[in-house]
Image (spheres, rainbow, N blue to C red):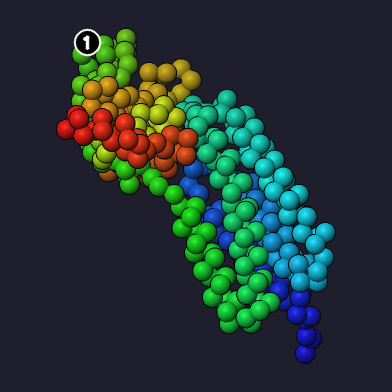
Amino acid sequence: MFDLPHHIIVILAGILAGTFTRYTLLRVDYRQYPGYPHAYLAHLFLGFIASALGSVAVPAILKPDYAAVTFLALAAQQFREIRSIERLTLESLEQTELVKRGLDYIEGIARTFEARNYLAMGTAFFTSMAAQFFGLAWTGAVAVAAVLFSYHFMEGAVVGDICEVVPAGFYFERTVLMVDKIGMMEVGLKEAREKMLKDGLAVKIIPKDANAKATIHDLGQRNAMVFTASVMIGVKKDIDTPEYTPLARKNNDTGEVGLFIVPVEKDIEQLIAAVRLTPVLESASSKPLKSGPGLRAVKKRR
């Protein structure tokens, strides 16, 4: 039977664990990107490279060959370039989207793909450490723990964690579309108004606290909710029907947000689920309750 050198086993264990982590994180992303085999292959290969660098670092340090560890710094620079490439790619695709993701959503996706390579590298490093010092039994346990940690770390908060999403009524005041007293837009064509009343759906997003209110106040976060809803349940909008553009508008007095859409599938439960699953963007996340003035302002209103 062929026996592999110990350092090869250490490196292979790290590469397998890190690559599997990247594969797992790639599969949980439901934001319509990446959506094609070529994109999946590119990200999996980058995850393999990150895993190889993380696993090779362990025998390189023990040799010792500290010059080899400097490749980690080079890898970090390359992964920062990945963020720029993803941003440019999504900005190019944005030009042909009928419902825009928005710049905040694009930046969030680009940061996510950069961070996932670091997680793959970290998983590979700690798995290789376990293989080097504790044997195969502990290696499996450490690998599983690292994969679960990465999965949990990248899962992130969603709108359903910070807001209540409930069905909302909608109507027209003359030509202005209203969702529970929130003015959405003006629709001049009578035929369009009739179709919107017949086929449209609306929900109201109610923040659970002042932090949530500040988060959904962000225009990028509201745009992300609209995009997620349009992806998951479809939208009856085309180039020549701009009045069917889904919208999310805020009640300036209460901080609640009304969302209206003319979906392909008219199912209010699916719309609620789609809005609840919208990720909370890092750029929109705000916590005024953690500041003295913000907390005192909330108490004063109460």
Q: Residue shown at 49%/64% (left/top)?
A: 148
Viewed as shown, does residue 253 lie left or right of 270? left
Q: Position of residue 286 (x, y in %)?
A: 39, 36
Mark 1 nearby-residue class (10 Å; few <14, some 14–19, many ≥20):
few
Which residue is painted at 42% across and 43% down in the image?
Answer: 279
Q: Secondary structure at mark 1?
A: loop
Q: To which residue does mark 1 refer?
A: 174
Can you see residue 185? Answer: yes
Tell me if residue 70 comes above or below residue 14 in the rendering. above
Q: Amino acid at mark 1?
A: Arg
Specify the farthest residue to the left: 302
Q: Is residue 221 left or right of residue 289?
A: right
Determine the residue positioned at 62% across, 53% down.
118
Instruction: Please tell me in which quadrant of the rendered image residue 143 appears.
Output: bottom right
Count of numbered circles in the view: 1
Between residue 209 and residue 101, name the one nearer to us: 209
Residue 71 drawn at (x, y percent):
77, 55
**Left or right of residue 281, residue 94 in this image:** right
Quadrant in which the N terminus is drawn: bottom right
The residue lying toward the viewer, choosing from 302 and 219, is: 302
Above or below, 187 relative to 161: above
Q: Is residue 5 left or right of residue 18?
A: right
Of the 4 image quadrants, the one containing the C terminus is top left
Q: Residue furthest front?
A: 292
Residue at 31 percent across and 32 percent down: it is 294
Does residue 19 show up? no
Location of residue 77 with respect to 302 vertically, above or below: below
Please provide percent x and percent y for residue 168: 22, 32
Residue 134 or 217: which is nearer the viewer? 134
Residue 80 point in image, percent of width and height: 67, 42
